[in-house]
Amino acid sequence: MKFLKSVVEEMKLVEWPTAKENRHDTLTVVMTSVGYALFLGACDWVFQKLITLFVTHK
């Protein structure tokens, strides 16, 4: 019981982000994820082409 009371007291001290801050942070995460996905996809495509070139080269 003492633990739960201390949790409630601590949660009152937390400074929660605003809706605008949440939207900004979410957009940052989504855009970063898309950027990394595009970069890694491009790297994969280049390596696939290079490996195909080396394997089929006679």
Image (cartoon, rainbow, N blue to C red):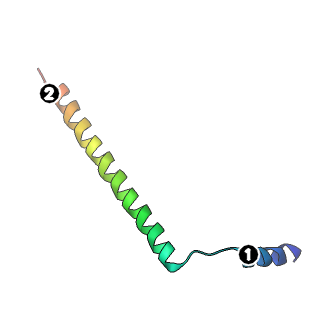
Q: Residues within 10 Å of mark 1 (few under 14, many from 20)?
A: few
Q: Which residue is farthest right? A: 2
The image quadrant where one finds the N terminus is bottom right
Q: Secondary structure at mark 2?
A: helix
Label 2, residues with CA under 10 Å away: few <14, some 14-19, many ≥20: few
Residue at image location 44% in from the left, 62% down from the top: 29
Task: Single out the mark in the foreground, 1 or 2.
Answer: 1
Q: Where is residue 10? Give x, y as percent.
A: 77, 73
**Which residue is situated farthest in the top direction here?**
58
Taking the spot 83% from the left edge, 74% from the top edge, the residue there is 6
Q: Position of residue 51 (x, y in %)?
A: 23, 31
Viewer-nearest residue: 14 or 58:
14
Residue occupying the point 16% across, 29% down: 53
Above or below 56: residue 25: below
| Circle 1 SS class | helix
**Image quadrant in which you'd find residue 28:** bottom left
Label at residue 13: 1
Which residue is denoted by mark 2 in the rendering? 56
Amino acid, disc 1: Leu
The residue closer to the viewer here, 11 or 49, is: 11
